[in-house]
Image: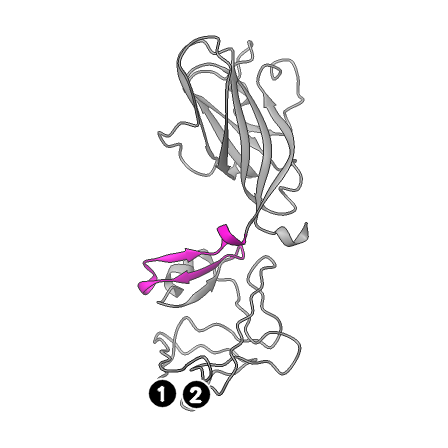
Amino acid sequence: MSTEETPTSSRRRLLRAGIAAGAGAGVSMVAFGSPASADADPVRIGQDNDAGSARTTLTGGSATAPALALTNQGSGAALVLQPTPWEKVQDAALRGSLTATPQGDLLLSGVDGTAMVNSSRWANHTMPITPVRILDTREVPRSSAYDQHIVGGRANVDSNGRLRAGTTIHLTVRNVQPAAQNQAIAAYVNLTVTGTVSPGFLSAHSSSVTRSAASSLNWWAANQILSNLVEVQLGKHNGNEFSFAIYAAAATSVVVDVSGLVLTVPQTL
């Protein structure tokens, strides 16, 4: 087995304490066996290991004699990944590198960073909840019952309780438990239209992105009642987190029920 090693800009600070990747995520990366020596430029646990702009390449090794072995004499894990700011993630994404984002997601790079596998979708927890109604536009003109969930576009609901044609209303699930505590990134919402006046559609999307041409619920005549369950990504609207938008192509009353959440910090449940 042979080992070739040169400095790297993507080498992380190695600590003796347990592994932490952002918001509570932890993984263990300990290989056992007789590691190859890297006398010219050793990786030292407990010290900063940063050698400029070149990369380190480890070659050779096997399951019984790995090219790099990480061990810890104490009770903690041998490798700690410090979060990398988003603007630095792409720079750090050398082939085979493992990067921790500020949100605690792990990014495993492909060929020179052109392909990245995000761990968060598989590390998240999809949690069904007792359905919570966060909007019924028929009541908005007369009641403030849904104001805690409306973070933008309340004025787009007319006096008849319909979301006006060509307008958007922004909603937050911040007050739907446990969205804020467990950092929800998506929600399962049941969209219902009633009192339609002409053919149209609704489009649900994250408040942080521009609406696309995709529709979430379609109707084709007046006086219809239709519903559809959609998974919608959450974002931010005017500083309000855990938010998503609903756009109405034609005037209609809209009812929104939340029946599930996708959580990024499920271990605190």
In the rendered structure, the answer to whether residue 169 lies left or right of residue 3 reads right
List x then y, in percent, for residue 254: 53, 19
In the rendered structure, the answer to whether residue 24 lies left or right of residue 65 reads right
Q: What kind of element bears circle 1?
A: loop
Looking at the picture, which amino acid does disc 2 mark?
Ala
Residue 112 in magenta stretch: yes
List x then y, in percent, for residue 230: 49, 32
User: What residue range appears in magenta?
Assistant: 102-123
Dot 1 or dot 2, earlier in sequence: 1
Q: Residues within 10 Å of mark 1 (few under 14, many from 20)?
A: few
Work out whether 95 lies above or below 245. below
Looking at the picture, which amino acid does disc 1 mark?
Ser
Work out whether 185 lies above or below 226. below
Q: How is the structure coloured here?
A: one colour
In depth, the one of 133 and 90 nearer the eye is 133
Which residue occupies 40% across, 90% down?
Answer: 40
Q: Residues within 10 Å of mark 2 (few under 14, many from 20)?
A: some
In depth, the one of 143 and 218 nearer the eye is 218
In the rendered structure, the answer to whether residue 143 lies left or right of residue 100 reads right
List x then y, in percent, for residue 75: 66, 77
Residue 185 in magenta stretch: no
Pointer 1 with pointer 2, Cβ within 8 A = yes
Residue at image mark 1: 2
| Badge number at residue 36 | 2
